[in-house]
Amino acid sequence: MQLGLVGLGKMGFNMRERLSAAGHDVVGYDRDQNISDVASLAELVDKLRAPRLVWSMVPHGDPTRQTVETLRDLLEPGDLIIEGGNSRFTDDRSNAELLAEKGVKYVDVGVSGGVWGAQNGYALMAGGDAADVEHAMPIFDALRPDGPREKGFAHAGPVGAGHYAKMVHNGIEYGLMQAYAEGFELLAASDVVTDVPATIKAWSEGTVVRSWLLDLLVRALEEDPGLERLQGYVTDSGEGRWTIEEAINNAVPTPAMTAALFARFSSRQEDSPAMKAVAALRNQFGGHAVHPSENELED
Amino acid sequence: MQLGLVGLGKMGFNMRERLSAAGHDVVGYDRDQNISDVASLAELVDKLRAPRLVWSMVPHGDPTRQTVETLRDLLEPGDLIIEGGNSRFTDDRSNAELLAEKGVKYVDVGVSGGVWGAQNGYALMAGGDAADVEHAMPIFDALRPDGPREKGFAHAGPVGAGHYAKMVHNGIEYGLMQAYAEGFELLAASDVVTDVPATIKAWSEGTVVRSWLLDLLVRALEEDPGLERLQGYVTDSGEGRWTIEEAINNAVPTPAMTAALFARFSSRQEDSPAMKAVAALRNQFGGHAVHPSENELED
Amino acid sequence: MQLGLVGLGKMGFNMRERLSAAGHDVVGYDRDQNISDVASLAELVDKLRAPRLVWSMVPHGDPTRQTVETLRDLLEPGDLIIEGGNSRFTDDRSNAELLAEKGVKYVDVGVSGGVWGAQNGYALMAGGDAADVEHAMPIFDALRPDGPREKGFAHAGPVGAGHYAKMVHNGIEYGLMQAYAEGFELLAASDVVTDVPATIKAWSEGTVVRSWLLDLLVRALEEDPGLERLQGYVTDSGEGRWTIEEAINNAVPTPAMTAALFARFSSRQEDSPAMKAVAALRNQFGGHAVHPSENELED
Amino acid sequence: MQLGLVGLGKMGFNMRERLSAAGHDVVGYDRDQNISDVASLAELVDKLRAPRLVWSMVPHGDPTRQTVETLRDLLEPGDLIIEGGNSRFTDDRSNAELLAEKGVKYVDVGVSGGVWGAQNGYALMAGGDAADVEHAMPIFDALRPDGPREKGFAHAGPVGAGHYAKMVHNGIEYGLMQAYAEGFELLAASDVVTDVPATIKAWSEGTVVRSWLLDLLVRALEEDPGLERLQGYVTDSGEGRWTIEEAINNAVPTPAMTAALFARFSSRQEDSPAMKAVAALRNQFGGHAVHPSENELED
């Protein structure tokens, strides 16, 4: 099958490899001309036979929006755009509306698998019309893990559902990582278990907590048993935040996911303004000593 | 190897099967004479050759303590008790002290695997002296999953470390389940994803969240797609509580694990006294309507 | 001072009383003609001398927006609208832009005090240009509590800052109520303290936790010592949700406020889908008993 | 009334002042002979007329236990010890049993008020037999705030109930401070409200959130508007931890109080081991960049 692929970064590059290996004809475009197959999106569209299939794999927000807008002007009725970046589900709806004016179809796909996807395959969650999803199925089949289709692919619902599913997936991911991380910290903090990496490795088989994330934690601890080579500084890319906002919109209590998000926020603070306020209050009512800031010490 | 096994309940019964299948000579004791191989603990001890190996697999707390005390009177110096129940790690220390007076050795083992352990093997975390752990290794090898020993067994540290490791394992388990559960609820509550079971099943391979627990959630949703056949009522058996208490003792923030524990507490409340207080306060300051209790409605 | 007041509900009605008592000339409008001084907003505007001052006190969202749009068409350059409802701060910005096209000025005011405000005065947080805020000061002085102005009034910042301040105020309020409520539940659940209402009343003076909310809790417990006459069912009106969304937007960890919001969500659920998932998982891996739903029992 | 007072630290010293001012005859003992009225506990007991009343106000744990044990040997049947330190309620029970063997009575009193108690009076929560509590009432009346007795004193229940009430009081206190602190941080982090101290001061009267703690926050912000002179480093003294442990023992969900405790734990960590684990996991699955530790940078 012929596919235009816009965005050949960490994810797109690997996906092209996997698709080509499966026999698909991928025409790739990237702003970096060194890795791009074509000079422009116009040339990309030119090279594709109608009805065209174009997969967009660029950062969410403005870059995705601009790609969609540019492609709208270049594509023809009956062509199909698959948005595989990490767009917010609400963006999908406005993208689809924009394209529908021109008769161009739209499917959004949440893609999970990270750097391992090239090798293991990517799990895919698609949103859109059934016919459009079905049309692109050979591409999905090449990208997803080997084995039964339903264990690595789902048609989650209408436009937006693919990214919604991926968003919730990532919210869960936050919670899972936080749970392992808290357990690791407790083992490390107490002096009862003397071999923490071996203990966690023993959970690899037979336990209730066995998982791919656990396997990765085992790997990380093999490389750096006390995790002393890195800081406890964790960024967040948007999907965790959107998950909690959606939870609030739907009045769904999500304390574990939210704890994970807040722990990331805290990890990036040099000092906590809230805890300054608590320290100040305790000093006011109880005369409890405060720790002067470094600022203050220098005065 | 010859082993006395005290307690032939759901766990002990399956373990006897697995040990026997591996060629070990298991003498089992249970209060239920229909399944017991011997009439009493005294007879069990009689049947074992010194140095004896006795595995206790009875409920934690008083039953385990009584078993240890009875065995102390029956066993001889050099014999070894393995406590494989869900004891608190602090109980292990007092058990070991009690037995040390008599020269009887003690190893505690956290056992994970539930009803699937008979088939998949149990992950084991042992606490005690290295020589004692080594002595019982053929038993551990028969119980643990096939494959490399370190992926299903660890000598976690001195006496107590085995159950400490299992306690933290269970704390993590609480957090993992809570994360999946919150994600499930959010998918179900919003109307964006129209096929929730298929979406969750698509996470089985390739994703960051793939795990054995996810596989079990897929199974549960295949049996009952909306989970309509059961109540959201969840008990807790102790290890989750102990984990949080240990986190507090060690000043380790564990918000996700704690959220999971509190969610279970809430699940068992017909009505929340705290939320009654909030409702009462809002009524006091804002004249906000309250919902009368059923009690009140009947008056 | 002459003031048009749009919206004579629970809040607006009381405010008119307080303003009139202070000697201001209030022309009130309400959809309910029985309590309205004028037949229409047009008549209200007619009755006011330029530069006019109109206070809008209608529900946030569409009603406020419609009031602003209607007044825009009726008012003249130099007139000033004060939006005192519970608008989101982002709405203030678009309201102000809409009015600026016509030369009409805008100040947003967060109003705290509930049903007690008529008697105690309302705390006010204003957002807008200094000159506009200053112009309306006689009205603010009449509404705020007696005593020094700065203990019941602040010019918090530009347009939107008044409602932002009120939003955060309400987020704090959620957290405070949750803290008292959790303490109440713990006292009630344990059997150590035998006189819970008397114990809480003893906190009224001298303690670190004394507050107006505590006084209200004492009142509520005097009326209903076990809070048995009401359900633990708590609604939420928007500002708590917005606070958490803003916390997320600003990467500020707000676990206590969020806990309060989630507790309200839970209070309104008959059964928790998340806890159904946890129960299903425990049944899958451990064979733990589940509670069948009432649905199921009827089958 | 005559009273022996053991422990003349920050709290005991101020209490002696307040009791003396009320006309009571206080004989004070402290290890520091410069402030002690007597050379030893034996001399203190000698100076008191039977039935003696001795108030212990020393740190909880070993110091309190030693004081109780020493006094048991010195006191006579019918004498009464009031334990006013911050003991855990379970300690009260063993203290009372120890003294009962000798016929000495015991009342535990939770004391709130901090350094302001000397001036405002202390709120008191007493646990013990009604007759014993009644006997010491003149002392309680002198210590508590002016006004009606029930607004600063409660007989909360049997031995232990006084400290239990104080423990829950402090748990609530943690939650309240956390709520104000989160609100402060959010105001400070966003750029919408431009005058944060003035905004918070405006909440002093008329609002739902007005409280003594808020007044103290206003004071703190007047002294240091951005709280730049101190670190967000907050210790905890035990009662917050005990509250959560009791909540767990009673299956009471206390997410806001627990959030406050965990925020304190985090405030004292230079780096978070849990967040190191999350960073390591993200690096493993997504190739996300990690921040090398300072350690590592030096290598």
Image: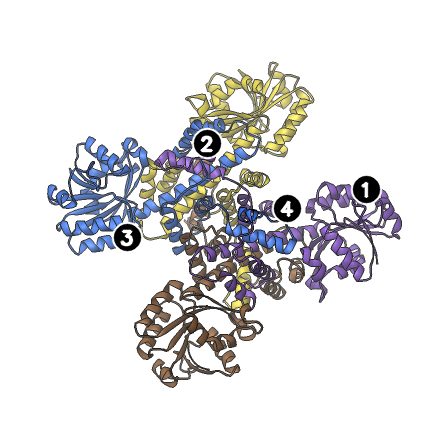
Chain colours: A blue, B yellow, C brown, D purple
Q: Say few, some or many: other residues with alpha carbon within 10 Å of mark 3 (under 14 / 14 to 19 / 20 or more).
A: some
Q: Mark 3 falls on what kind of element?
A: helix
Check the residue under mark 4 and report the chain it is in.
D
Tell me if label 4 and label 2 are in contact, CB under 8 Å.
no
Mark 2 belongs to which amino acid? Answer: Glu
Q: How far apart are marks 2 and 3 (CA)?
A: 45 Å
Earlier in the chain: of badge 4 and badge 2, it is: 4
Which residue is labeled 3 in the image? A91
Tell me if label 3 and label 1 are in contact, CB under 8 Å.
no
Mark 3 belongs to which amino acid? Answer: Asp
Mark 1 belongs to which amino acid? Answer: Thr
Dot in front, 2 or 3: 2
Residue nearer the viewer, B125 or C4: C4
Q: Are marks 1 and 4 on the same chain?
A: yes
Dot in front, 3 or 4: 4
Dot in front, 1 or 4: 4
Residue at image position (44%, 47%) is A265
Q: Position of residue A151 (x, y in %)?
A: 30, 36
Earlier in the chain: of badge 2 and badge 1, it is: 1
Which residue is labeled 1 in the image? D70
Q: Mark 4 falls on what kind of element?
A: loop
